[in-house]
Amino acid sequence: MAEKTVLSSGLGHLFMTVFVFNFANYMVVPAITDVSMAALCPGEDECSLAIYLTGVQQAITGMGSLVMMPLIGNLSDHYGRKVMLTLPMLLSTLPLVILAYSRDRNFFYAYYALKTLTSMICEGGVLCLANAYLADNVPLSRRATAFGILSGISSCSFVFGNLSTRFLPSAASVFQVSAAVAMASVVYMRIFLPESSMEAALIAVSLKEETVNDCLLEKGCTNNRPPSRTTPSLHDSIALLRSSWTFSQAAIVAFFSSLGELGLYSALLFYLKAEFHWDKDQFADLLIINGIAGIISQMVLMPLLARVISEEKILSIGLIFNCVHIFLYSVAWSSWVVYVAAMFQILAVFAGPSLRSIVSKQVGPTEQGKAQGCITGLCSFASIVSPLIFSPLTALFLSDNAPFEFPGFSLVCASFAVMIAFIQSVMIRAPPQPVPDSKLDDSASVEA
């Protein structure tokens, strides 16, 4: 009973940490488009420079994250989730402080440079480690529901973050509040979040390695294996991808669904600005609708569906509705169509948590960080490819030099990428039993 109480408390503090951290970062989403265009193209509704800079930032961030996410995930398997969470949460506050001070052009460029560098570690890092923490503390039978609740918490922070932006008087106050809340999330995490339950497994592995090291020092020891290598490498991620066909299929789905979603997010606000002359308040309204739909979906619908249908089917449902969701944006002929398209988010958000749950069941308990980091790294690779495709398309079709009249053409291409992910998801079959963790098996044999 006491152990369940500790676990429940740990998950509660994890949810609060994720909520406060995401709240701080989501606050700036509706405002950053106006801030970017005011700094780079004042007084204009279309700005190719802002679109291309956003794409370059996304690509550089993706290249860094492609390396850093598997590394951070692997390190968290060895040193603990809480220790590794501190770094991305702390670094993410620094760019916010710059725009909290000033939004002038020079300060914007300073923000842009620092944001690009820190996002290599921060972009996806908190999500990766939070998913690994959750997998450590939740049994297999309840894991899909738990991942859905975690995504629902993120949607809650998305709604409240955008809602607060809607009522804050200026961009200056948005970034000031965001920076303060981001700092508070780090303090809360360090004080209240306990280390995850995989700490015992880490201790067992450490004891095993110490035993092997002692054996190597003693001439009479029959076990002459070298100590286990704990330094993460690209080979680890490749071996993980090859370890299970289900994992490989999930990786393909993760890449193409992320490619489509990144194409949507990189183009949508600029598209709405150019076509319907929206500002930060209307952006916030749209994002709030998306967030509320996500809350209903992940906190209510997904736990109910997870009891009656498999995660693979939930994944496919989420992807096909996401495809429709993006396509409707691309053909919107009036503002009300945009809001209708946003309502499809209620089923589109199924894809993320169900995919993470499928992945978590393919590895053992002390390899959750490695698995989640690998998938996050592939999503980061999509963020390298995405701006190469969607930034030029968005800038071209929003300009006066478009080859034909279709401002939402880049969004159609994004929906096509999600369709590829859907087709692959249909081919995923029920995953086998979780792969036994060789590390735990070895440690058990040493103890025996």
Image (cartoon, rainbow, N blue to C red):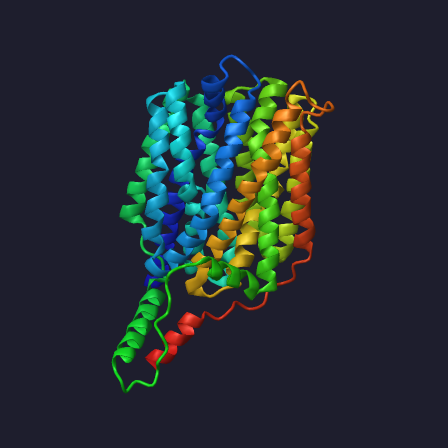
> Residue 149 versus residue 417: which sits nearer the camera?
417
x, y percent for residue 371: 48, 58
114 left or right, relative to 318? left
Up-down relation of residue 151 to residue 407 (above or below)? below
Residue ID at (45%, 47%): 127
In the picture, the quarter occupied by the N terminus is bottom left
Residue ID at (56%, 32%): 266
Q: Would residue 361 be seen by someone viewing this image from the given angle?
A: no
Q: Would residue 159 be seen by someone viewing this image from the given angle?
A: yes
Up-down relation of residue 387 to residue 73 (above or below)? above
Q: How many marks?
A: 0
Up-down relation of residue 248 to residue 130 (above or below)? below
The single residue placed furthest to the top in the displayed view is 43
Residue ID at (41%, 51%): 129
Res 81 → quadrant? bottom left
> Residue 172 versus residue 164: which sits nearer the camera?
172
The single residue placed furthest to the front in the displayed view is 219
155 left or right, relative to 320? left
> Residue 20 versus residue 129: which sits nearer the camera?
129
x, y percent for residue 327: 68, 34
> Residue 120 versus residue 91: which sits nearer the camera?
120
251 left or right, relative to 34? right
x, y percent for residue 7: 37, 57
In the picture, the quarter occupied by the C terminus is bottom left
x, y percent for residue 389: 62, 36
